[in-house]
Image (spheres, coloured by chain):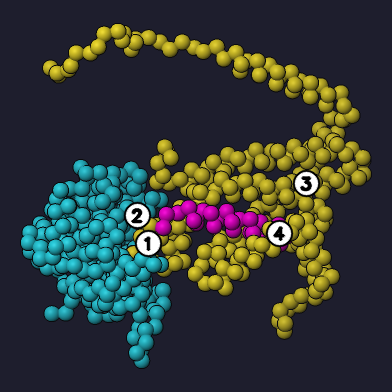
Chain colours: A yellow, B cyan
Amino acid sequence: MSRSEALADGFPDLSGHRIARQAHWGRWLTAAIIVVILLAIGRAFARGQIEWSFVERFIAAPVILRGIVNTMVMAVAAMTLGIALGVVVAIMRLSPNPVLRTVAAGYTWLFRGTPLILQLLLWFNLALVFPTIGIPGLWSARAVDVMTPFLAALLGLGINQGAYTSEVMRAGLLSVDIGQYEAAQAIGMGRLQALRRIILPQAMRVVIPPLGNEFIGLVKATSLASVIQYPEVLHSAENIYYANSRVIELLIVAGLWYLLVVSILTPLQMLLERRFARGIARSR
Amino acid sequence: MKPLVAIRQVSKHFGEFQALKQVSLDVFEGEVVCLIGQSGSGKTTLLRCVNQLTSADSGGIWLDGELLGFREQDGRLHRLSEREIARQRLACGMVFQRFNLFPHMTALENIIEGPVQVQKRKPAEARDAAMALLRRVGLADKAGSYPSQLSGGQQQRVAIARALAMTPRLVLFDEPTSALDPELVGEVLGVMKQLATSGMTMLVVTHELGFAREVADRVVYMDQGVIVESGPAGEVLRAPREARTRAFLAAEVG
């Protein structure tokens, strides 16, 4: 039998009571207002000058489908280049070597400091600066032949993305506790091996949400490549409406495709996050 | 007999603050030496200099006769390459106050990381050796657990196994029980005692005077960057000669 002291009177036993449901009148009211507003907007669009049949006809047109494939190919290729550059530049930024640090800071400054569309136009028109390009004595070619819309878009988007990604990566590397680096050194690892085996895997957990953000931004930024004739989905939509003047309908087609792609990317990001959360307690 | 570690006239500044002032110390093979003293007395800095996580401003440290961090040539010291320093570090195991296990790896993966990635041993062999070490620290059933699933005491025991997996000449302990809940201190000290009995050379920064009294061959008392008193554990702890040592011990015992 456990010993206990006498308790004060006047405090009844509530352990058997159920908790009553709350009414939440405010929630019902705001929901009703929002439904009314949405209906009004929907009605306005239904009655507006939009031929929805054109949207239906072009949503799966071969040119549009080829356009969205090109958009995805460019987004993935440019992001791959961007991440590769971003990792290298972030590591350079944190290097003890002042030359590497300065080069890395200069790169970020230059490519974050100028508009993306300007960079795309510069790459595309590189032939105006360098009519022929190549390695002296080994190989050379006319720049107009080499600098296709695809290559210009890849370099423009990828190198620009690398500048932003390097800052995301740097934040990730800095978020890892210094003790992790010391523990890696204590088992005889060099700087690069410690980064690759110990620091980067932990930094990935932190950088995936902002990188997902960056990638979604890049998917939409590929539309800028339409100005240098890269046949991505907006470029395809524009070409169609130059011919049939159904501007709004085709912009809606392109918009729906962007929305679909971004909607698919969000759950993919969740999967990646789970992969890199290995060993981290769920509660955190 | 030549000492395994010879520390000579080592000084270290952090800005204006002088953490070590011309410190000299020998540690012989098989010895357990405990460094005691208040926070800020320089004992952790001295320990970190031995495996070059901190580099001394002046002075020298020799491990097994080899000068650490520098090559002496024509009366000048030339800094060694990062690769050379990494090789020299293999001789020292290090156990940190805050464990510093790799959180994205299981206990077993933490232990075999160094042997496989740095020493290029065969994974199967490293795995067998790691399991033997886990049994030795009493955690054979936790091989597949991540650090976040282990208690502080268990994490520190895995960290000790990780240090031993590199087959070091000596193991450095930086306040290995200071970050632990009181009821978990005993299990870590138990593993350290067993390690001392097996003949491992150990340099231990600690506040656990009971452990020092029981296990240490020698105790070194540091204050304000200098070694105030050092000698056999029984003498320094029971009958300190210096007034500062007596004051510290009186305060520690309470």
Whether callout 2 and callout 1 share a subunit is answered: no
Q: Do dots 1 and 3 share one subunit?
A: yes
Chain where mark 3 sits? A
Asked if disc 2 and disc 1 are in contact, CB closer than 8 Å, the reply is yes
Q: Nearer the viewer, mark 3 or mark 4?
A: 4
Name the amino acid, label 2: Asn
* Cα gap from disc 3 to disc 4, whole angstroms: 27 Å
- Type of residue at label 4? Gly
> Cα distance, mark 2 to mark 1?
8 Å
CB atoms of marks 4 and 2 within 8 Å: no
Distance from label 1 to label 4 (Cα)? 36 Å
Q: Which mark is residue A233?
A: 3
Query: SS at mark 3?
Result: helix
Mark 2 — on which chain does it sit?
Answer: B
4 vs 2, front mark: 4
Q: Which mark is residue A182?
A: 1
Element at badge 4?
helix
Check residue A199 in the rendering and tell me which mark sits there, or answer none: none
Residue at left offset 77%, top offset 49%: A223
Does residue A130 appear anywhere in the picture? yes
The segment highlighted magenta reads: A153-178
Question: Of residues A56 and A238, which is closer to you in this image?
Answer: A238
User: Magenta includes A164?
Assistant: yes
- Residue A160, position in %: x, y? 68, 58
Q: Which residue is mark 2?
A: B100
What is the CA distance from the residue labelled 1 to the residue labelled 3? 49 Å
Q: Position of residue A261 (x, y in %)?
A: 68, 41
User: How crowded is the residue under tag 3: few (<14 C-alpha within 10 Å), some, or many (20+)?
Assistant: many
Q: Earlier in the sequence, mark 1 or mark 4?
A: 4
Q: Residue at x 18, y 64 (%)?
A: B221
